[in-house]
């Protein structure tokens, strides 16, 4: 039997898709794709299979639409296949998904631990000639896993990738005004530290050199059991594990961590000097309306602390454009904070009203044309800031985990510890560099005509890229 998994959305979804993939392999399936292509509906890529799992996202209306398009494309290309939909969209609007022709099973996030069993039963029924679609379990009565503990866990396959995601937490209780995710993921549930450490040992033994700790709101790790210092302690314990590896944090929330926590995080050995710290707006008025529980100055205090520890500390963020009531003055506050913070990358999103959230019915909706224009201006400004930040890194030495190697072309690429993408061009590039660290002296980003590229990301979704030369050390 052949299976394929298509993953939309966050790193937690990616982690859970990996867990489902492992379980399918244990059931004897041939998994057709190592990494599901969530843009298959747009790109035309298609893998024929007997079973498709769509791990959906619902953070915006666009994410919902991508899931629906993908499902319909799969049904068109493989009319006799079995299609299962899970993830956040399945959690928040299973009725809508169940109405799509050809969907055989809809299962929410908390049903994922039992999903493979449901699929096995479904496939047995189909093999027996029963073509009636089984009723999707109801959120109130389904086998939805252990809501107070961990959900899916997995041990990475050896050599599958250079970095390994490890899920440490699920759920969120912040209920920001615009966000549907607490409704899709439920209450905060932290994985036991010893379980996380066991998985970390396994992925390190499998050859991974970077561990990425992910969660729906990872900064809340331990808060559900009254232990707000649990995250710091977990990372410190992981850093004590033997071996040459590094730890990277997924997205954190400034409505949970503060300047003091940031200082302690920055001091932990093996933890990368990079943080994705969601901002959402630079306007105190809009932050209050978003129910974000911090002010712009609080955010900048965290930034200053991190960059005091390492001037090259890499910061990325999320910003929502066009939240109801956002004025030009509010938007200017956001642009100003982008410059003060010095982000490597800003992920900008237009406000997307989600039914059931506090912001869905707010007055003062910003016209679409103004939102589009602000998105353009924010992208331009963030690209300029990224270029300025990269200039400060010229001639600096950074440790790079090599992920791609072409010895014939003499090119190697990977991410520095502070999340700058680095390309090495040298006749010395060797195949054994892959999945190993190299110390690199950073140089200016150039194009093929040897002209400087500033800003290097030029309004695209790509991370900034710098060239560099290898420094021979004991790496």
Image (cartoon, grey):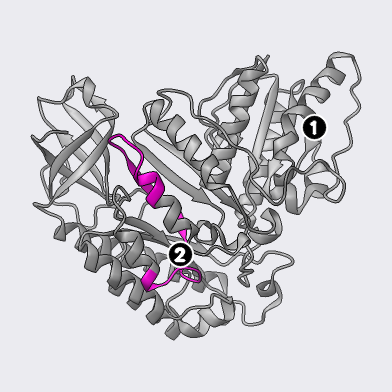
In this rendering, the answer to whether 276 lies above or below 363 is above
* Residue 254 included in the magenta stretch of the image: yes
Mark 2 lies on a secondary structure that is: loop
Quick check: can you spot residue 424? yes
In this rendering, the answer to whether 373 lies above or below 271 is below
Which residue bears the numbered disc 1? 102
Q: Is residue 251 left or right of residue 67?
A: left
Residue drawn at point x = 47 percent, y = 83 percent: 284
Quick check: can you spot residue 48? no
User: Looking at the image, is mark 2 or mark 1 nearer the viewer?
Assistant: 2
* Residue 175 included in the magenta stretch of the image: no
Region in magenta: 236-260
Within 10 Å of the Cα at label 2, are there few (<14), some (14-19), or many (20+) other Cα atoms?
many
Depth check, front residue: 133 or 75: 133
Depth check, front residue: 472 or 8: 472
Residue drawn at point x = 19 percent, y = 29 percent: 411
Instruction: Return the disc, 2 or 1, that comes first in the chain's sequence.
Output: 1
Mark 1 lies on a secondary structure that is: loop
Within 10 Å of the Cα at label 1, are there few (<14), some (14-19), or many (20+) other Cα atoms?
many
Q: Position of residue 401 (x, y in %)?
A: 27, 37
In this rendering, the answer to whether 140 lies above or below 265 is above
Residue drawn at point x = 73 percent, y = 33 percent: 115
Image mark count: 2
Confirm or deny contact between disc 2 and disc 1 (CB under 8 A).
no
Which residue bears the numbered disc 2? 278
Residue drawn at point x = 48 percent, y = 65 percent: 253
**Residue 1 in which image quadrant:** top right
Q: Position of residue 143 (x, y in %)?
A: 81, 40
Q: Is residue 250 left or right of residue 172?
A: left
Mark 2 and mark 1: Cα distance apart in space? 38 Å
Q: Is residue 283 left or right of residue 134?
A: left
**Residue 471 in which image quadrant:** top left
């Amino acid at each position: 039997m052949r299976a394929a998994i298509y993953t939309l959305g966050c790193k937690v979804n990616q982690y859970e898709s990996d867990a489902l993939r492992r379980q399918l392999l244990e059931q004897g399936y041939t998994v057709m794709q190592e990494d599901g292509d969530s843009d298959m509906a747009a790109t035309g890529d298609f893998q024929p299979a007997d079973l498709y799992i769509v791990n959906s996202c619902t953070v915006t209306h666009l994410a919902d639409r991508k899931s629906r398009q993908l499902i319909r494309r799969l049904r068109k290309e493989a009319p006799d296949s079995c299609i299962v939909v899970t993830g956040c969209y399945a959690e928040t609007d299973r009725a809508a998904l169940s109405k799509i022709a050809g969907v055989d099973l809809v299962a929410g996030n908390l049903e994922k631990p039992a999903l493979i069993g449901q699929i096995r039963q479904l496939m047995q029924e189909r093999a027996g000639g029963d073509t009636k679609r089984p009723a999707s379990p109801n959120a109130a009565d389904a086998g939805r896993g252990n809501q107070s503990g961990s959900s899916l866990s997995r041990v990475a396959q050896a050599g599958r990738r250079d970095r390994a995601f490890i899920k440490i937490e699920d759920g969120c209780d912040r209920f920001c005004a615009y966000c549907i995710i607490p409704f899709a993921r439920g209450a905060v549930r932290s994985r036991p530290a010893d379980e996380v450490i066991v998985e970390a040992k396994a992925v390190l033994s499998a050859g991974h050199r970077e561990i990425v700790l992910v969660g729906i709101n990872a900064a809340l790790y331990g808060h559900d059991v009254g232990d707000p210092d649990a995250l710091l302690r977990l990372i410190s314990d992981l850093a004590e594990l033997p071996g040459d590896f590094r730890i990277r944090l997924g997205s954190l929330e400034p409505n949970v961590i503060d300047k003091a926590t940031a200082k302690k995080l920055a001091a932990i050995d093996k933890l990368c000097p990079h943080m994705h710290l969601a901002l959402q707006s630079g306007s105190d008025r809009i932050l209050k309306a978003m129910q974000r529980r911090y002010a712009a100055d609080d955010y900048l205090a965290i930034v200053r602390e991190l960059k005091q520890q390492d001037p090259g500390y890499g910061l990325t963020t999320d910003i929502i454009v066009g939240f109801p009531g956002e004025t030009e003055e509010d938007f200017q506050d956001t642009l100003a904070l982008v410059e003060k913070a010095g982000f490597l990358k800003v992920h900008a999103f237009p406000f997307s009203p989600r039914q059931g959230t506090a912001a869905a019915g707010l007055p003062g909706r910003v016209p679409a044309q103004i939102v589009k224009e602000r998105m353009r201006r924010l992208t331009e400004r963030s690209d300029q800031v990224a270029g300025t930040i990269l200039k400060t890194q010229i001639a600096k030495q950074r440790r790079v985990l090599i992920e791609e190697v072409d010895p014939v072309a003499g090119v190697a690429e990977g991410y520095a510890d502070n999340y700058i993408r680095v390309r090495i061009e040298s006749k010395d590039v060797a195949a054994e560099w892959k999945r190993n660290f190299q110390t690199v002296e950073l140089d200016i980003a150039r194009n093929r005509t040897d002209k400087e590229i500033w800003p290097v990301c030029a309004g695209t979704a790509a991370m900034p890229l710098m060239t560099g030369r290898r420094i021979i050390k004991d790496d």
